[in-house]
């Protein structure tokens, strides 16, 4: 097998070296981006008079043909040719002969792979933004559909205060909205053209980098060729965002696992996103949520792999950088799959209105409001807190809820209670009174839903 770099070598490459050095088994998927970048490069070489126009035209036509053949699955990849670049160049030379050998003028695989990876990650970023949008739409529809469902809100996983289910769901809408914003910011830093940096120091050929940038949709040119061929910050940022996004999905997964357990009984996830047990016939397991939670760990691993890969690398390109591909591909694939699963799974979830409502009645979730009631009547809050604490202890002993207590009973703890206390304890009042922007009062949640709708419409 003739190597791209065979000239100065006498002996053949050891089979183990080939096995260690090949990346075609995982970078073949970069072919569409590699071809796009090569076409732009070839067009520029022709337009700048670096190679004859007929030859650049022939290269472009052949590359387009190779692209179609790859799409049709007609290609066999050769490990001896190392990577996607070596394989495509060899196909090109096979098709058009000597002219094909001119494509690599004024270019190195170092700026070539940097360009491919930027094009690839830019597309993956756009896909993630689109998938996040889809998930946010699903969350919003679900929140709107259950707009009057009341449920327990937790801290420490202990019953805390009642909230609207829609409010809980919109918390995830916010998380994914920040993810979307971050991706849009990362995209700007991805969208810089490294091509033209050549191996590390630039090229003596009169290239036109602006033309290539324009054709490939890059917003700017890299300003330092040494940085350009060895920078992988954008991949780290991409994986960091994937890890963060997965963390959000994983927290949600944890809740879905808990909520679908009969111990909570808040939801039932549709058959399409649950599985059974091979031994226990009664089981319906929330595997989609569990697997998402599990896969999150591996996406964290992708981020850590990249950070560790980079930490000891001197400028500029080092072959270690070939190892950046698999973590990025894995992080990207996993995050996309999990986002798609959640968007499809959410509409299959049945929320158990009565169970949720009943759960609100347990755990003294209106205790804060009882203390606030006393505070409103002039009792210092710290004292009110103490009094209500004693009332709760009394209720636990008597197996009662706060709503079961009559005025005489309440008076044993504090004289200040009067008839209006029953209204203060009422769950509807408890919710409605939390009427500040960002809080759970139905009026605020309706406003939040409206704003979320509007936001999605503008970010279409
Ligand atoms: N397959 C290589 C990579 O992924 C392409 C760049 C090779 N450059 C080199 N100087 N050997 O990084």
Image: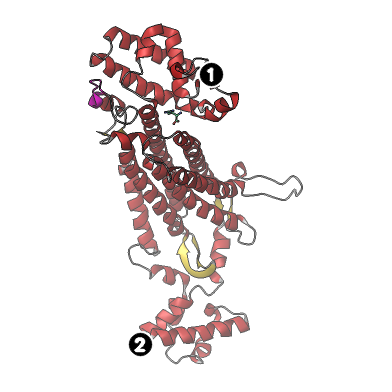
| Residue of label 1 | 11
Along the line of sight, which residue is nearer the eye, 112 or 316? Answer: 316
Where residue 113 sits, quadrant-wise, is: top left
Locate the C terminus and report the quarter of the image it occupies: top left
Of pointers 1 and 2, the one earlier in the residue sequence: 1
Query: What secondary structure is marked by label 1?
Result: loop
Give above or below for 411 relative to 165: below
Query: Which structural element holds mark 2?
Result: loop
386 to 87, vertically: above or below: below
Q: In percent of the image, x 40 and y 7: which residue is there? A: 96
In the rendered image, is residue 61 in sight?
no
Q: In the drawing, does residue 373 fall left or right of residue 216?
A: right
Type of colouring: secondary structure
Left or right for 183, reference 368: left
Q: Quadrant of residue 424?
A: bottom left
Residue appearing at x 48%, y 28% in the figure? 27
Tell me residue 279's x, y (percent).
Answer: 77, 47
Prevailing SS of the magenta stretch: loop
Give me the residue at 26% from left, 15% from top: 50
Q: Position of residue 447 (x, y in %)?
A: 34, 57
Q: Is residue 25 covered in magenta?
A: no
What span is in magenta?
A: 204-211
199 or 164, nearer to the observer: 199
88 or 226, nearer to the observer: 226
Q: Which mark is residue 22?
A: none
User: On screen, 249 above or below 410?
Assistant: above
Identify the residue under disc 2. 378
- Above or below, 185 against 446 in this view is above
């Amino acid at each position: 097998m003739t190597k791209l770099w065979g000239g100065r070598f006498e002996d053949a490459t050891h089979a183990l070296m080939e096995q260690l050095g090949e990346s075609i088994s995982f970078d073949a998927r970069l072919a569409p981006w590699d071809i796009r970048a090569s076409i732009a490069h070839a067009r520029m070489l022709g337009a700048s008079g670096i190679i004859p126009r007929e030859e650049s035209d022939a290269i472009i036509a052949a590359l387009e043909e190779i692209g179609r053949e790859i799409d049709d699955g007609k290609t066999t990849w050769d490990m001896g040719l190392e990577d996607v670049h070596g394989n495509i160049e060899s196909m090109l030379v096979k098709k058009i002969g000597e002219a094909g050998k001119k494509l690599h003028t004024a270019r190195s695989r170092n700026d070539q792979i940097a360009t491919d990876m930027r094009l690839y990650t830019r597309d993956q970023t756009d896909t993630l933004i689109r998938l996040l949008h889809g998930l946010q739409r699903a969350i919003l529809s679900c929140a709107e559909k259950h707009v009057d469902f009341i449920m327990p809100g937790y801290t420490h996983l202990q019953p805390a205060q009642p909230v609207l289910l829609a409010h809980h769901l919109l918390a995830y809408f916010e998380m994914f909205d920040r993810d979307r914003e971050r991706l849009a910011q990362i995209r700007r830093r991805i969208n810089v053209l490294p091509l033209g940096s050549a191996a590390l120091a630039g090229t003596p050929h009169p290239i036109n980098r602006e033309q290539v940038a324009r054709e490939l949709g890059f917003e700017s040119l890299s300003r330092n060729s040494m940085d350009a061929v060895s920078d992988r910050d954008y991949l780290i940022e991409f994986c960091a965002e994937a890890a963060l996004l997965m963390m959000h999905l994983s927290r949600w997964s944890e809740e879905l696992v808990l909520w679908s357990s009969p111990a909570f009984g808040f939801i039932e996830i549709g058959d399409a996103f649950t599985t059974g047990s091979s031994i226990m016939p009664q089981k319906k397991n929330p595997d989609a949520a569990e697997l998402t939670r599990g896969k999150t760990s591996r996406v964290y691993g992708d981020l850590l792999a990249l950070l560790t890969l980079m930490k000891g690398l001197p400028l500029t390109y080092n072959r270690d950088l070939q190892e950046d591909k698999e973590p990025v591909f894995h992080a990207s694939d996993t995050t996309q799959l999990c986002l798609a699963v959640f968007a499809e799974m959410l509409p299959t979830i049945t929320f158990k209105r009565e169970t949720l409502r009943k759960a609100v009645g347990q755990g003294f979730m209106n205790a804060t409001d009882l203390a606030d009631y006393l505070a409103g009547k002039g009792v210092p809050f710290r004292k009110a807190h103490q009094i209500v604490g004693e009332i709760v202890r009394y209720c636990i002993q008597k197996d009662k809820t706060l709503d079961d207590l009559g005025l005489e009973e309440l008076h044993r703890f504090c004289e200040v209670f009067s008839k209006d206390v029953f209204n203060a304890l009422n769950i509807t009042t408890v919710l409605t009174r939390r009427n500040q922007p960002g809080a759970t009062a139905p009026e605020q949640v309706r406003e939040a839903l409206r704003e979320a709708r509007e936001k999605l419409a503008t970010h279409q």
